[in-house]
Amino acid sequence: MQNDLRVRILVIANQKGGVGKTTTTINLGTALAAIGEEVLIVDLDPQGNASTGLGIDRKSRTVSTYDVLTGAKALSDSVLPTAVPRLHIAPSTLDLLGVELEISSHSDRTHKMEQAITKLLERPGASIPKFTYVLIDCPPSLNLLTINALVAADSIVVPMQCEFFALEGLSQLISTVEQVRRSLNPRLSIHGVVLTMFDPRNNLAAQVVADVREFMGDKVYDTVIPRNVRVSEAPSHGKPVLLYDLKCSGSQAYLKLASEVIQREHKMRAA
């Protein structure tokens, strides 16, 4: 799929749970929207935490990404506005748990999301804005849902928690990205690694940051997301932290990350 240069598709993925993946998706999307981008979040996690964290009631999810992947509905039918201007979401439901069984026999099973996004970008419909960023939130595993996201994406953003086992599994994820690039999506690249839940009082956290930067080099974003209680509280209120408390350290970090993401985009396009 050759995208319009003004549309970038980023997948936020890590097979480890609890690393801030959904939190990063929600708040990066919100920060990008806050600085003028038109953003669509595609929720591909059966838990639907990105949908819940943006205040989308389960009763409102009449069309979900499950319907999109099974071909019952177009992606445009699932798109809902959020409380954040310029931020929309395609929500998920627990039905996604069974989608692998339903599409596993299809020859195009790894390309379902790519096809859906292509149709949306080509024919968005009157009520759908012209998106400049699509962010795909994945489950914490390297299953068919994540592979669909990687096939549809231009780049992957990898959230990593600043903990002892941070690097564990990263090589597996990089290997999967290389495999997808070789066989399914030659344009896929690693956009960057974002370090999350950083506590400056913890000596181990500082060592993890140093180790990850040594291992991944300039692929690690300069911005580090701090451990911040306001970031943790925000999803229970159905809000991104930028709406919940704009002035807190977590909000400011995600705004910096959004600026850094856009700066990297400019460099990647110029290369």
Image (cartoon, grey):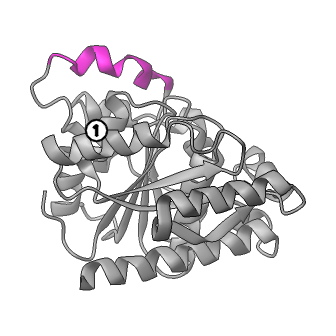
Please say whether residue 74 is visible from this viewpoint.
Answer: no
Q: Identify the image quadrant of the N terminus.
A: bottom left
Q: Which residue is mark 1?
A: 148
> In the depicted view, which residue is nearer to us: 210 or 10?
210
Name the amino acid, label 1. Asn
Of all residues shown, which one is farthest toward the right?
Answer: 201
Of all residues shown, which one is farthest toward the left?
Answer: 107
- The overriding secondary structure of the stretch rendered in magenta is helix
Q: Is residue 202 left or right of residue 184?
A: right
- Total labels: the figure holds 1
Q: Is residue 70 magenta?
A: no
Q: How far across and how far down the image is residue 62, in percent?
A: 44, 34
Figure check: 58 above or below 180: above
Q: Identify the image quadrant of the C terminus.
A: bottom left
Part of the protein shown in magenta: 94-105
Figure check: 42 above or below 206: above
> In the depicted view, which residue is nearer to us: 209 or 196?
209
Q: How far across and how far down the image is residue 178, in percent?
A: 27, 46
Q: Residues within 10 Å of mark 1 (few under 14, many from 20)?
A: many
Q: How far across and how far down the image is residue 56, in percent?
A: 58, 45
For the point 63% across and 72% down, the residue is 223
> In the depicted view, which residue is nearer to us: 43 or 142?
142
Q: How far across and how far down the image is residue 209, in percent?
A: 67, 60
Q: Quadrant of residue 250?
A: bottom right
For the point 67% across and 66% down, the residue is 224
For the point 80% across and 70% down, the residue is 249
For the point 46% across and 30% down, the residue is 141
